[in-house]
Image (cartoon, grey):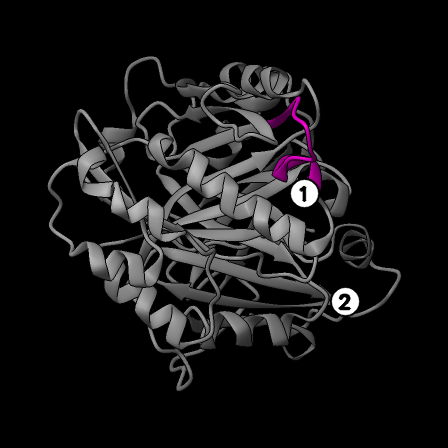
Amino acid sequence: MSATLHPHSLLHPTDTAKQAGDFMPLLGTDHVEFYVGNAKQAAHYYRTAFGMSLVAYCGPETGHHDRASYVVQQGKVRFVLTTALRSTHPIAAHTHRHGDGVRAVALLVDDARQAWEQATLRGAVSALEPVTLRDEYGETTVASIRTYGETVHTFVERGNYRGAFLPGYRAILHDPIAQPVGLLHIDHMVGNVGWHQMDEWVGFYERVMGFRLYQHFDDKDISTEYSALMSKVMANGNGYVKFPINEPAEGRHKSQVEEFLEFYDGPGVQHIALATQDILHTVRSLQRQGVEFLHVPHSYYSELEQRVGHIDEPICDLEELGILVDRDDEGYMLQIFTRPVEDRPTLFFEIIQRKGSRGFGKGNFRALFEAIEREQQARGNF
């Protein structure tokens, strides 16, 4: 498993990360690894639809005869698409059960061994003991712990590595297909867990990784006439990494979390929020390249200015694209959600632009969830 866990760098000031009392300083999200049924085709989708560039590859041509991995990147957003080459490989079992989905959320650290030791000392179950990988570009150390479902967190230490990605990967110097859309970095990643498991995993992140409760939403905040869920947002000590954790709540119909758990066959990463500095440009580009978004009714925009006050973006443009807006004491934010990017109604993406706000769109929850319910109804899963 050691060579399937992959990085590069989200460079943040190291001294900022080492805050007092933070026993596991994280420098940011290094990459997200997906286990998929066909990595070549999945990589092509993220290149043509999301405009990401192919930057590295490993497979039989690089000495890895059981799997293939394609590394795609835009800004500091880095995805690794990995597939099994034989039906007996554990990756094949993962995709058979879950479909295409997130296996590893990799976190950049100064010392991967120390991060792994701190986590396992506090009760985390090891998925990969620290291993150092080397090639002509230097060395990098990785280690992993288990989290909800079959998801793992991988600690990546790459201060002494200058290659394109990880040892064992071949660099791709130019991608003629990619058309970037302005993606900058991962803003947050949302995990769905089972009934009454949210607080268990909130406790895990507090105890094992030193995270703190950042925001909390109950079923009164996140509900419609028909369905509801609960959510707590966990953030690490310096705030670079944020993981909202969702669980189902009682409602008249099946919630989006219940639908995810059913089709993913267990807990997992529900969506990844990707940051941009110009959401109008990014969303127009994504739509032009084939990405499908949830539909928002006209009534949402007829009341928007009254609810959020003055904003810089023309409301007619926001309505044309289906972009939501929410304001808090620090500013406002703009967000939009894709439809599921798999045939199973599991993984989707959020595009987000922050203009001061550090929230998660509480004022948009009802409009968003009603849009998701319309999709569920069309699938017959409501």
| Residue at the limit of the structure toward the bottom, as seen here | 176
Query: Which residue shows up at 42% across the image and 84% down it?
Result: 177
Foreground of the two, 87 or 144? 87
What is the crowding at mark 1: few (fewer than 14 residues within 10 Å), some, or many (at least 20)? many
Q: Quadrant of residue 37?
A: bottom right
Image side of residue 308 versus residue 323, left or right: left
Query: Which residue shows up at 60% across the image and 52% down it?
Result: 375
Does 253 appear in magenta?
Answer: yes
Q: Position of residue 207 (x, y in %)?
A: 53, 14
State the mark number for residue 212: none
Q: Quadrant of residue 257?
A: top right
**Image height of 198 relative to 244, above or below:** above
Q: Nearer the viewer, mark 1 or mark 2?
A: 1
What is the crowding at mark 2: few (fewer than 14 residues within 10 Å), some, or many (at least 20)? some
Image side of residue 359 versus residue 100, left or right: left
State the mark number for residue 260: 1
| Residue at the limit of the structure toward the right, as seen here | 88
**Image height of 83 relative to 372, above or below:** below
Residue identified by numbered label 2: 66
* Amino acid carrying mark 1 in the image: Phe
Q: Position of residue 12 (x, y in %)?
A: 26, 42
Query: Which residue shows up at 70% across the image and 27% down it?
Result: 194
Foreground of the two, 371 or 262? 371
Tell me the magenta residue range.
247-260
Res. 320 in view? yes
**Labels 1 and 2: the sequence-earlier one:** 2
Helix, strand or loop under label 1: helix
Image side of residue 124 versus residue 326, left or right: right
**Image height of 292 relative to 114, above or below:** below
Helix, strand or loop under label 2: loop
